[in-house]
Amino acid sequence: MPKKLPDTQHNMLHQLIAQENGDGLDITPQKNFSIYRNNARLLLRDFLKDTFPVTAKLVGDAFFETAARDFMQAFPPQSGDMNGYGADFPAFLQRMPGLQPHPYVPDMARLEWAAHDAYLSPVKPALTATALSAAAADPMALKLYIQPHVFLLRSGWDIAGLWQTITEAGENNLPEITLQPVESFTAVYRDGPQIGLWSLTEGGYTFIEYLQSAPDFPTAASAAMAAEPDFALDLFLGTLVQQKFLTK
Amino acid sequence: MQKLTPEKLKHAKTGIGLRSGHMADILATQPDVGFLEAHSENYFRIGGVPFENLMCARADYAISLHGVGLSLGSADGVREDHVQKLKILVDLVDPVMVSEHISWSGIGDAALPDLLPLPLTEEALDITCRNITHVQDTLGRIIFVENPSCYISFPDTGMTEPEFITRIIQRTGCKLLLDINNIEVSAHNLGYDPLAYINALPTGIVGEMHLAGYQINTVGGEDVYIDAHNNPVYDNVWHLYDAALARFGNTPTLLEWDADLPALDVLLAEAAKADTHRMTHKKDPSHAQKTA
């Protein structure tokens, strides 16, 4: 017996993603293919809108609808585990024509993806000040581990401030936006079930960034001081402990 | 709490879906329901906020894990990473039931968050059975598989959906999660008798039932029932439920409401209606047959 199911499934999935009409599929009634086709588009649009609500508000419904459809066609979900769907959306927005008047939008999407990731990440036991003091007796051998729910965003705009403004304005209000370019460094993290944003200096950002790639304190400290010669490392370490950003 | 089994769930109240919009209310008010059903994939990120909430709920309720993305009907097999994530979750939650759908959602390197229908062919039967067996072997337990809701059908092969499902269950040893709303939706859309569907299924294979409300859309000038889970259960579905109780006996039941979520009280009232139907059936098993 010929194997037909793979061909049927490839054809049907292709047509759903491409938003076609189901032509050539041996189905009845043909007109009802549109239900699956519309479901695909609307479910993925709503999924993205839930993950990127502020981005959606910034670009407006019509633009977001187009962006979500084009994204689905360029980067369809790869599995039934949808937790990773949308990771490429910020970079996709960056390449979309029509966003020139709002050049900060892709960075807002990056911030929202970081918030999504933080929300789904675990909180490990925090390193206490006492434990840090004991471990810091030999600073050259000190290893520091950043919590897995901490994510960094570097932008040419005050994205954290914009996020705050739009979120506080409520669901149906979009305040007038006049953003001036300014370099910003933000840590996105979760505090219980809430998402927190912490505006960092370049030294603090660099310190965390280095620790995320390798837990080696001396290397991270040198990199932070190089990025920001006046960086107050001792003070920053105390704040990291206070914020429970460090883990064992 | 005492460990529940699907058999003991028969004597518990009707369960409700544990959806994010009701999570805080459920954890705070701890309503008197038989069990909670969680969509497995929403909790795959171990340690995240949804997972923490699920583990809180688990302290007070039996949990049923209901998957929507495993794609048991995929011709190229279920994705191994998905099965492994499910296994990790199952091992941590120790759910009273694990269920999925007789449908497919992806092939190759693409997928959609939808439950797409399968042709009722020997080839699709073999593939689905092979996938179910692999999942059951990996999890080390049987799963419950749900009859689909369909808006289209493939060319008639002479095999009916009840026959397709029965053969899956006979070959894999899994149980049927009989979704009463899906029967009504598919029967309306594809033009068959929903009662005949129920009567064509053998007794002894149904391990759980689902109830939900559909939505009516107009497509090409005709009403199409959409399995939207966004309404109260319709009367015709309650009648079918009575018929199913009469045929299969008192069965653990779940009230699904996934979109346009009402206040938790409204959902609980719907679940209580299902309890009333089950009680009526228990007292007078012939009642359900009479009303159907």
Image (cartoon, coloured by chain):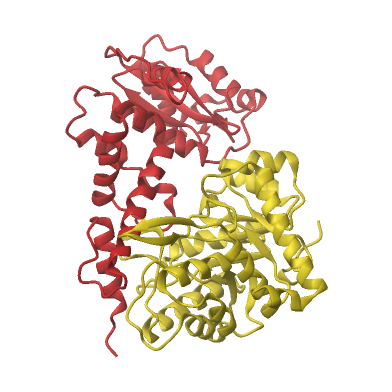
Chain colours: A red, B yellow
Q: Is residue B231 above or below residue B70?
A: above
- Residue occupying image coordinates x 69% and y 48%: B57
Q: Is residue B105 left or right of residue B41?
A: left
Q: Is residue B278 above or below residue A147?
A: below
**Position of the N terminus of chain A by quadrant:** bottom left
The x, y position of residue B228, in whole percent, is: 48, 55
The x, y position of residue B159, in whole percent, is: 42, 86
Q: Is residue A189 left or right of residue B30?
A: left
The x, y position of residue A244, in whole percent, is: 59, 27
Tell which of A16 and B99 is nearer to you: A16
Tell which of A80 and B87 is nearer to you: A80
Tell which of A103 and A150 is nearer to you: A103
- Residue occupying image coordinates x 52% and y 44%: B260
Looking at the image, can residue B232 be seen?
yes
**Position of the C terminus of chain A by quadrant:** top right
- Residue occupying image coordinates x 25% and y 23%: A102
Q: Is residue B3 left or right of residue B201?
A: right
- Residue occupying image coordinates x 35% and y 30%: A55
Q: Is residue B184 above or below residue A3?
A: above
Instruction: Work out which residue is located at the far top of the displayed protein and give it.
Output: A230
Tell which of B47 and B183 is nearer to you: B183
The x, y position of residue A42, in whole percent, is: 36, 48
